[in-house]
């Protein structure tokens, strides 16, 4: 599960770099222009599904079943809504619904 989360975060960061490159023309990494946004979106969809399934399998014990909704919601939110304005790590704290 740690490997899947690391891959998910890595591809999310690469997607953010591609969006920043498309919006401003500034390349945050040497090979940002080689990435394809459609491919990154598809990889993130597959990885988010794998992360959610791995977490659900991990939490099959009766004590942890209520915790499934939190990573599920936040992973879905990150994939669907994303961050279309580039790298803003404090965006999560501006959203009040994440604390509910």
Image (tube, rainbow, N blue to C red):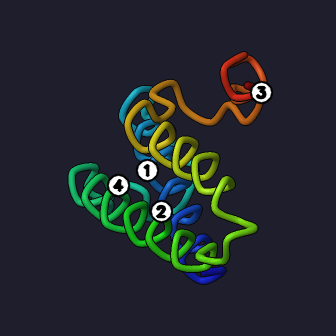
Q: Residues within 10 Å of mark 1 (few under 14, many from 20)?
A: many
Labels 1 and 4: the sequence-earlier one: 1
- Asked where in the image residue 49 lies, by quadrant, the reply is bottom left
- Is residue 96 shown above or below 39? above
- Identify the residue at horizontal 69%, vertical 26% (top origin): 91
Q: Name the residue that disc number 3 marks.
A: 99
Q: How far separated are the C-alphas under marks 2 and 3?
A: 25 Å
Label 1: which secondary element: helix
Q: Name the residue that disc number 2 marks.
A: 11
- Identify the residue at horizontal 40%, vertical 27% (top origin): 23
Q: How far separated are the C-alphas under marks 2 and 4?
A: 15 Å
The reply to whether dot 3 and dot 4 touch (C-beta < 8 Å) is no
Percent of width and height locating residue 38: 21, 51
Q: How far separated are the C-alphas under marks 3 and 1?
A: 25 Å
Count of picture labels? 4
Q: Name the residue that disc number 1 marks.
A: 15
The reply to whether dot 2 and dot 4 touch (C-beta < 8 Å) is no
Q: Residues within 10 Å of mark 2 (few under 14, many from 20)?
A: some
Percent of width and height locating residue 55: 57, 71
Q: How far separated are the C-alphas under marks 2 and 1?
A: 6 Å
Disc number lying in front (3 or 1): 3
The reply to whether dot 2 and dot 1 touch (C-beta < 8 Å) is yes
Disc number lying in front (1 or 4): 1
Q: Which of the pair 82/27 is nearer the observer?
A: 82
Percent of width and height locating residue 10: 56, 65
The reply to whether dot 2 and dot 3 touch (C-beta < 8 Å) is no
The reply to whether dot 1 and dot 4 touch (C-beta < 8 Å) is no
Q: Which of the pair 75/54 is nearer the observer?
A: 54
Labels 2 and 3: the sequence-earlier one: 2
Q: Name the residue that disc number 4 marks.
A: 33
């Amino acid at each position: 599960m740690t490997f899947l989360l690391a891959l998910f975060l890595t591809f999310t960061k690469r997607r953010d770099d591609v969006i920043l490159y498309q919006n401003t023309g500034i390349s945050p990494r040497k090979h940002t222009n080689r990435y394809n946004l459609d491919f990154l979106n598809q990889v993130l969809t597959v990885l988010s599904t794998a992360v959610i399934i791995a977490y659900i399998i991990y939490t099959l014990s009766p004590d942890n079943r209520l915790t499934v909704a939190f990573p599920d919601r936040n992973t879905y939110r990150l994939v669907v809504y994303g961050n279309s304005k580039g790298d803003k790590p404090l965006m999560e704290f501006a959203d009040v619904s994440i604390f509910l």
